[in-house]
Image (cartoon, rainbow, N blue to C red):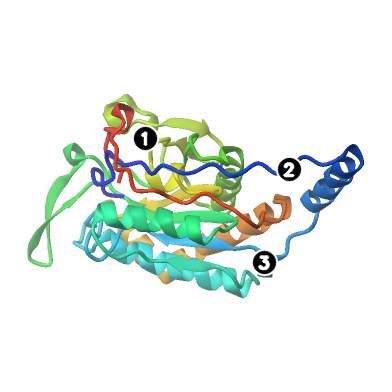
């Protein structure tokens, strides 16, 4: 994730219409049906996961220690995750690629999710560090920048998302599955030296952080989680992130977390849903850079 290109944006959304009241007998019947639906087993073929490829070719995000754009890493991992999900029976797993400049890309993401509702939104990114931590080195005859100080993945959710509890539930499942694969999250986001990029750790076991004003998390009308798969400015971790076997390891953790999450989710409600509007406003608390 490259800091500084999502500042100052949030997307307003319209409220859903309330359903008409029914009689006491119908209400009781409806409650029973809801409980039955919530307890129903997962139907992977009907469970729609949207896999968002972070950034775009036009705005590729951070540069790795060897000069590779973050977008390349995001796309490769997202494709691996999509393939693994489809192999597991999640036939409606969808890869979301949004070309264009930063603001246009953000609006496209939110508008797409409003018009094509899903059961889960997972945004794929790879991490960098604040400029102050970067050092210079020469690779392939060119000066590049790196930071070997930090490594590991991190997971983000927004308390402003309409389905924050469900977002947090999936984030925890994902973090625990990554941990089960022998992977560790990075703890440095809680440190004071991160300044305005400091984040609250809401699940110390699974490595889940709170990032309320991140647009793709707060304005997506479904449970939404962002995964920073690893630090590509760390020279050793960059090589791991480019390794197909390591990508498959992460994708396997994602699939297992999705399977667990699917078992706990009631079927997605059909009918009206909120649509993203286009009022580019800049709330004061959102001034800190995000991606």
Q: Nearer the viewer, residue 33 or 168?
A: 33
Residue at image coords 89%, 41%: 28
* Other-residue count near label 1 (Cα within 10 Å), few / some / many at <14 / 14–19 / ≥20: some
Mark whose residue sits in front, 1 or 3: 3
Tell whether 42 sits left or right of 22.
Answer: left
Helix, strand or loop under label 3:
helix
Q: Gap in Å between the C-alphas at discs 1 and 2? A: 49 Å
Q: Which residue is mark 2?
A: 20
Contact check, label 1 and label 3, Cβ < 8 Å: no
Tell whether 18 sits left or right of 128.
Answer: right
Q: Is residue 124 visible?
A: no
Q: Which residue is mark 3?
A: 46
Q: Which residue is mark 1?
A: 188
Residue 73 higher or lower than 203, as above or below = below
Helix, strand or loop under label 1:
helix
Q: Gap in Å between the C-alphas at discs 1 and 3? A: 38 Å
Quadrant of the rendered image containing residue 125: bottom left
Q: Earlier in the sequence, mark 3 or mark 2?
A: 2
């Amino acid at each position: 994730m490259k800091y500084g290109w999502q500042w100052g944006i949030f997307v307003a959304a319209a409220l859903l219409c309330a359903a008409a009241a029914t009689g006491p007998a119908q209400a009781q019947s409806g409650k029973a049906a809801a409980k039955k639906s919530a307890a129903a087993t997962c139907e992977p073929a009907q469970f729609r996961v949207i896999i968002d490829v972070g950034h775009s070719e036009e705005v590729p995000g951070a540069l790795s220690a060897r000069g590779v754009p973050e977008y390349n890493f995001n796309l490769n991992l997202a494709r691996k995750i999509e393939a693994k999900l489809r192999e597991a029976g999640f036939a409606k797993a969808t890869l979301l690629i949004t070309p264009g400049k930063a603001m246009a890309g953000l609006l496209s993401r939110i508008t797409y999710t409003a018009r094509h509702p899903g059961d889960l939104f997972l945004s794929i990114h790879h991490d960098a560090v604040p400029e102050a931590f970067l050092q210079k080195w020469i690779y392939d005859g060119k000066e590049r920048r790196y930071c070997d100080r930090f490594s590991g993945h991190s997971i983000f959710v927004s308390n402003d998302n309409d389905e924050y509890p469900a977002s947090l539930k999936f984030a925890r499942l994902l973090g625990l599955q990554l941990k089960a694969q022998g992977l560790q999250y990075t703890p440095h986001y809680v440190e004071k030296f991160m300044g305005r990029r400091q984040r609250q750790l809401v699940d110390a076991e699974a490595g889940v952080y709170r990032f309320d004003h991140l647009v793709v998390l707060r304005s997506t009308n479904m449970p939404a989680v962002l995964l920073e798969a690893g630090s590509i400015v760390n020279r050793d971790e960059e090589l791991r992130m480019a390794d197909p076997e390591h990508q498959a390891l992460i994708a396997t953790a994602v699939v297992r977390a999705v399977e667990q999450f699917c078992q706990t989710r009631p079927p997605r409600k059909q009918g009206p849903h909120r649509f993203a509007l286009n009022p580019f406003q800049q709330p004061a608390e959102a001034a800190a850079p995000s991606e």
